[in-house]
Each structure stands twice: as structure tokens, then as C-alpha cells.
Image: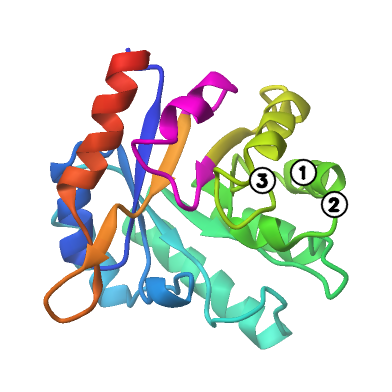
Amino acid sequence: MKHYLVECCANSIQSAIQGELGGANRVEFCTNLEVGGLTPTREDIATLIATIGIPIRILIRPKAGNFIYSTPELLQMIADIQFCKTIGCEGVVIGALNLSGSVNKEQTKAMVKAAKPMHVTFHRAFDEGNSLQQNLEDVIACGCDTLLTAGQNNSVSNGLSNLEKLVKLANNRIIILAGSGLNHSNSESLYKIGISNFHLSGSKKNQQGKLETDALLIKAVIDKLEQIV
């Protein structure tokens, strides 16, 4: 059994196919990666489920910018979560903050409740939070299964010390999924601090200038992990 997991953040059906070809264990499906990712269309979600053979988690994020949501936006997110559950997605990726930078526990709990028994990841809204330890405790208390984070930083390399703290603070109560700027050159340092779940888009610009996953960049991380695990 492998002692690591690689999740491909795919911003299109083609990117998800490339992620699977590269050996990714799972896909986080979104669109508009250039603004941090938004919820893909329901049609594309249905198409992807019929296209690839690895588990799919859907990013639930209706707008770019911040992670502060109105009641209508929350209701839209809950409807999208329920669609994902109905169609057979393995999980969803959510996150909501208050103006202060604390976790919006009411909204997060409402989304977790709508999602179960699907797997729930709290996304990198966490990295815009106001407290490493308290925000971690709140995410756990809300019932999330995984936390996607760069250690409240802009990249996993810059957030390495905080990621190490998070692994220790989490103490196996939640999965720490490291992502943002992750590649074959920094995956070993992450593994050495106790990270075994890795998230990357492995993307580069295609001929049309759009970011698209390259299977070889996913494979490079997996090859590196195979050497060190």
C-alpha cells in the first residue's frame, strides 16, 4: 500500500484526464484556475464522472475574490453540494470565512451537513485566516475530513514551518493536504515533516494561453515520492 496520495487540481476535463494519466490518485475539479478556482458546470461534472476512473472532488466556490458569502451564495453552494452528492462525486471542497479572518463555523457546518456522507475538504480559504491553531480547531470542529493548505502562506515552500506545526497540532484528527506551488523539487521536504497528501495542478500554459495539467508534471512528483517512501 502506498504511503502517500497525490491529488490533481484540474481546471478542465482535459486537465483531469492528464492528471489520471500522470498517476494522480484523485482529482479536485474546478474551473478558472487563474482566479484560484470556481465551481465547474454541472454538465462538466457529469461528463467527468463518466470519463475518468479515479475519485472526484468538486470545488464549491461561486465567486472569485474573498471567502465571505451572503445567504443567497450559501444556498447556491448547498445546492451545488447536493447535486454533487446526487450524481456520485466522492467529495466536495469548501470554505467560508468571517470578515475577521476566522472560520465561518455556521456556514461551514451547513455545507458539511449537506455534503455528508461525502468527504469534505476545507480549502485554502484557511490560508487567509487570522489564526493557525484556532482556525485549525474550528475546521476540525465543523466536521471537515481534510484541510488543504500552504501553511497560511502563498506556497508550500514558504509555509513549510507552519505546515509542520499543523501536522503536529492536527495529531491525526484531520488529513493535512499540502498544496500551492507543490512540485517534484519540494515534495521530499514536505514528506519529511509528516505530509503524505499532496495537491498540485501540474499545469502550464497551452497553445491558447490557458493553464492545463501536464501528465508529466504529475508523474514527476509521484516518481520523486516513490524514491523516498
What residue would you read off at disc 1? 136
Packing grade of label 2 (10 A; few <14, some 14-19, many >=20) is some
Instruction: From this view, report whether residue 86 is shown above or below residue 24.
Output: below
Kind of element beneath mark 3 = loop
* Secondary structure found at label 2: loop
Vertically, is 123 above or below 167? Answer: below
Q: Quadrant of residue 107?
A: bottom right
Q: How is the image coloured?
A: rainbow
Q: Earlier in the sequence, mark 2 or mark 1?
A: 2
The answer to whether the residue labelled 3 contacts the one labelled 2, judged by CB atoms less than 8 Å apart, is no
Residue 116: image location, x then y, percent? 56, 48
Q: Nearer the viewer, mark 1 or mark 3?
A: 3
Residue 32: give x, y in percent of width and height: 38, 77
Residue under numbered circle 3: 151
Q: Is residue 193 magenta?
A: yes
Question: Which region is colored magenta?
Answer: 178-196
Measured Cα–Cα span from mark 3 to mark 2? 11 Å
Q: Marks 2 and 1: which is nearer the front?
A: 2
Residue drawn 76% across and 67% down?
A: 97
**Along the polypeptide, which appears first: circle 1 or circle 3?**
1
x 59%, y 23%: residue? 193
